[in-house]
Amino acid sequence: MQISRLPEEFLEEMQALLGEEYSTYLASLEERPMSGLRMNSLKADAGFARSRLKLSDPVPWTENGFYLTEESRFTKHPYYYAGLYYIQEPSAMSSAALLGTREGERVLDLCAAPGGKTTQIGADLNGRGVLVSNDLSASRAKALLKNVELAGIGNVLICCEDSAKLAAEYPLYFDRILVDAPCSGEGMFRKHPAVIRAWVEHGKDFYCPTQKLLLNDAARMLKPGGTLLYSTCTYNRREDEDQIEMFLSTHPDFTLDPIPLRPGFTNSWILPGCVRLFPHHARAEGHFVARLKKQPAVSGDDGRYSTKWQRPLKKGELGDAALFFQKLRREIDLSRILVQGEYVLLIPETAQLHAGLRYLRTGLLLGQLKNGRFRPSQALAMNLRKEEWTDPIDLSADSPEVIRYLKGETIEASEAGQGYRLLCADGFPLGFVKQDRMRLKNMYLPGWRMQ
């Protein structure tokens, strides 16, 4: 990028922050921005990336991340449409990795769109526990929903809500909370120069009040003994260390949990224990991360949760969905099924729902019922494994039929049949088709199709 495009005030602050490293930092801005790919461990691991995708340059702060030299080869591959990986800037992989999510926990991603960190947390949960992914912007939350469903994550509640309303409904509920706060984006100037204009228009302190509010609301929702991780993609201390110091001064039940240094991490000299990523030290864009621990309670949390949403299913309410479920080699817990209008959803087992909140999705959308007839959803297809379907159609990812399917076209079957089938590429589900003799009617979502 052209250094001359950077605001003079920003350059002065960076020189004061970096001192003798300033010239090295400026030189790094002339280099190519970094790009990365993170494997979705719900579907494939780092070994698959090495053997099948021929990736060999790992991101050091996350288990399943790799550097890319070019993205287009991976975003056009059927594996991308199967949800095997997520294209993500390498520094952004650090936040969810440092959160340390464990299976079975209740986790909140407070500013979740477009979903890179949420899908990483969802993979760490491995189908157990519950993930609440929230974003105040309705348009961004829709992108979040697509990425969550593409990744095959079912134990999730997707919200479009103000943090204060969430805090009122979920007090002391979550084991871990990620606040990847909206910020001035100084760390992304190299990769997205358009952010510079917003920095100039809004002013350098525009997001500070929002960041303070998000941290305070997150504190109300975190269980005693829980972990709160705060991150930004900016450099100035007002949005980074100063926010943490102010928070700790007003929340004596929290302490800073020092983050161990890894290759590319720089220990904050302003508030040791926090880490920064600079492009002249790490192969990444700019990032800041602080991890906080809440003091354990004298008496432990008993793990109870509200199940007010649960009610017995009425006779015939599922229509022929019950017959459809028999095609699955997976047990469906009918006590967790919620029918909302024509939508059939499978609610996460530890989920707590509140009528006053705006949910875009409550659990896994199994499908739709119209006049008693059940139509399985794209989300269900992505949540399944090939072996969980009785008669899958498995095609080579290199076959022209797979590309035609992803473009929304009807394809021909190799043998006659009838009914819904799960279409896979190299064993990884892509979506459903409805077979009528030798024709496979395309059910792939129009908004997901390959262009």
Image: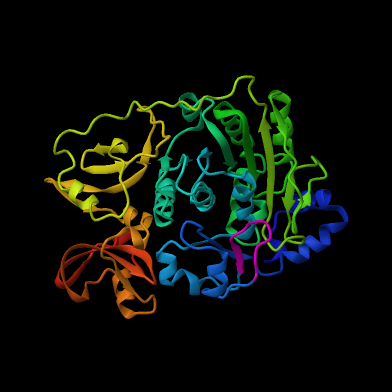
Q: Position of residue 160 (x, y in %)?
A: 42, 39
Residue at image location 42% in from the left, 39% down from the top: 159
| Quadrant that contains the N terminus | bottom right
Residue 205 lies in what quarter of the image?
top right
Q: Position of residue 420 (x, y in %)?
A: 21, 61
Q: Quadrant of the C terminus?
A: bottom left
199 left or right, relative to 78: right
Q: Nearer the viewer, residue 365 or 358?
A: 365
Q: Is residue 41 above or below residue 309?
A: below
Q: Tell me if residue 448 can be seen.
A: no
Is 438 in front, or is 96? 438
Tally the numbered discs.
0
Query: What residue appears at the point 52 percent right and 42 percent down from the top-left corner?
Result: 111
Q: Position of residue 314 (x, y in %)?
A: 17, 33
Q: Is residue 60 on the magenta stretch?
A: yes
Residue extending farthest right = 20
Position of residue 58 in the picture relative to residue 41 (left or right): right
Q: Position of 228 compared to 260: left or right?
A: left
Q: Which of the 4 image quadrants contains residue 383?
A: bottom left
Does the stretch in magenta take in 317?
no
Query: Start and end of the magenta stretch?
Result: 57-67
Residue appearing at x 37%, y 37% in the figure: 359
Pinpoint residue 166: horizontal percent, then vertical percent: 47, 30
The kind of secondary structure the magenta stretch mainly shows is: loop
